[in-house]
Image (spheres, helix red, strand yellow):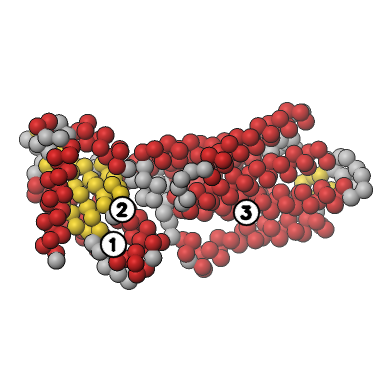
Amino acid sequence: MDMFSYIETNLFCIAVLVVMLIALRTSLSRLTNQTILTHVFVMLICMLVLDTLKLLLNGVYFTGSNLLTCSLASVFHVITVLLYFQWLRFVGYNMQLRFWRDRRLMTLIALPGVFAIALVAGSIKFGWVWSVDENNLLSRGPYYPVYITCCGIYMVFACILAGHRIPLKRYFSDRVLYTSLAMFGLFPLIGLSFEQTTDSAPYSVYAMVLSVLLVFLEMQSRMISTDPLTKLNNKNQLNSFLDSKIGQYTENRRVYLFVLDLDKFKGINDTYGHTEGDSALNMVADVLKRVCGPMGCFISRFGGDEFNLVAFLASDADAESLSKTIKDDLARTSASLPYSLTVSIGYAASRGRSETVVDLFARADEALFAEKKAKH
């Protein structure tokens, strides 16, 4: 790739990232995963700017040029390590994993990154990862493959974490997101294989830009139809789904609407804080995905501490059995929490096109109110 095409490609990638960054920063939501993705965008922009400056300076000698090239190369390689680490965090948050709270595990996860940064620091004097000759020409050092391996560990780990959920039925609704997350680990590795045979363009960086574009587009799509906290369907999707299914009625297959409400959720927020409250909501969402996902149920968060299910069941006995399974699974999952996490569940079977979605909701809410009243 000639210099003009190289710089033109870098500038185009920067422009794409800036547009996505502006869209992300002007979003009404301010969730942790969006903050991490913002960091990823900023680091990619910095890498492309630094790479362009390195290209313009490469082989150009003037007073202080060696020091400037060394500085650019050092910052570029450090940001690369931090970027891969941040992406693993982003994948972890989107998958609602909790390993970031484990200090011992986090220390182990950080070790490859710390070692890679140590190699970068040593390159200034010993040329381990890169070196600059007397003509200000930048070249790779003998330990560059070791450095790339340390960075690649994060990519492979992220790819495996997201990829292993793709074929699982309980994560069917999240399959496109997990595929996009896994691609960020796969595409840069392919780009790195090209870089090993050429000193021309940073194909791995271009691959990262393509990958984050796919993830960004999927996130934007999900924001229209998905609850940003739990990643479940939102109220609009629920209403659309119910409206299309409410008329489906046979003797052995009826449409059931379940309304679930967390018991004493306000007390959890007031006592333990809203962060813990969000964790409780995510725990309930995970239980619903685990129990109801394989059954083909439509799962949504209506808002606040209320969730909804649409299930196709043969009788009220099946509906009662499903309610009990949800409560039992939640009891096991939340057993170690310092507070009681339980739900009240009301349900109603559709009477076909003879009633509206509003009517069905009213009957399910009435059943929910009766269960809550019985508990107090």
Quadrant hosting residue 12: top right
Give the Cα separation between the discs numbered 1 and 3. 38 Å
User: Three-letter amino acid code at disc 2?
Assistant: Gly
Residue 146 at x, y percent in the picture: 68, 53
Q: Earlier in the sequence, mark 3 or mark 2?
A: 3
The crowding category of the residue bearing disc 1, from other C-alpha atoms within 10 Å (few below 14, some 14 to 19, many at least 20), is: some
At a point 58% along the width and 54% down the height, the residue shown is 85
Q: Does 305 sit above or below residue 255?
A: below
The crowding category of the residue bearing disc 2, from other C-alpha atoms within 10 Å (few below 14, some 14 to 19, many at least 20), is: few
User: Three-letter amino acid code at disc 3?
Assistant: Leu
Q: Which mark is residue 265?
A: 1
Q: Does 134 sit above or below residue 2?
A: below
Are circles 1 and 3 on residues that touch, CB within 8 Å?
no
Query: Relative to 311, is 116 on the left or the right?
Result: right
Q: Which mark is residue 82?
A: 3
Q: Which residue is mark 2?
A: 304
- Residue that protrudes farthest toward the bottom in the picture: 338
- Residue that protrudes farthest toward the left in the picture: 251
Q: Does 366 sit above or below residue 176?
A: below
Could you say whether the residue bearing mark 2 is in a helix, strand or loop?
Answer: loop
Give the Cα separation between the discs numbered 1 and 2. 9 Å
